[in-house]
Amino acid sequence: MTLVLSLIIGLLFAAATYCLLRRNLMRVLLGILLLGHAVNLLLLSASDPLSRLPSILGKDGTPEFPETADPLPQALVLTAIVIGFGLSVFTLVLARSCFQQSPIDDVRDLGKEDRS
């Protein structure tokens, strides 16, 4: 299972890098979103994703179950999902305003029509 998760993370990073290196504005935005998902999966895989036991402390302060899931990476990923959602909405609004101002989709030609 860990090998499959590692392959998925690698494919997401590769697809995000490919999309970020393209000239199309929508592919760059898609690359940013894919990169966010890849980082979220990487953070979750840093904890033990196969452990399904809750982390409950006993009366003496030690965990009742020694093989419990770490809640910190899960909290970080939940926060990253919320921030990623806000970033995706912002980038979509930014792309929409770029398309309304000019129909140019090439990233390198976006600022050239203002200079003329």
Image: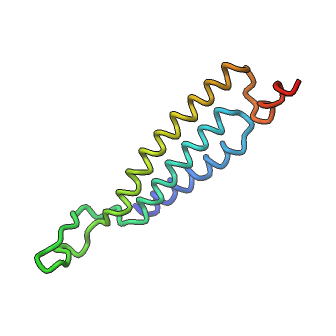
| Quadrant (top left/top right/bottom left/bottom right) for the C terminus | top right
Residue 79: x %, y % from top left: 40, 51
Q: Residue furthest front?
A: 115
Residue 113: image quadrant is top right
99 with respect to 41 (left or right) = right
Residue 4: x %, y % from top left: 46, 58
Which residue does the image show at 67% across and 46% down from the upper left? 18
Q: Relative to 27, is 65 above or below?
A: below
78 with respect to 56 (left or right) = right
Which residue does the image show at 38% across and 51% down from the upper left? 78
Residue 19: x %, y % from top left: 66, 42
| Quadrant (top left/top right/bottom left/bottom right) for the N terminus | bottom left
Residue 46: image quadrant is bottom left
Residue 6: x %, y % from top left: 49, 60
All told, the count of numbered labels is: 0
Q: Nearer the viewer, residue 7 or 91?
A: 91
Q: Residue furthest right?
A: 116
Q: Relative to 35, is 73 above or below?
A: below
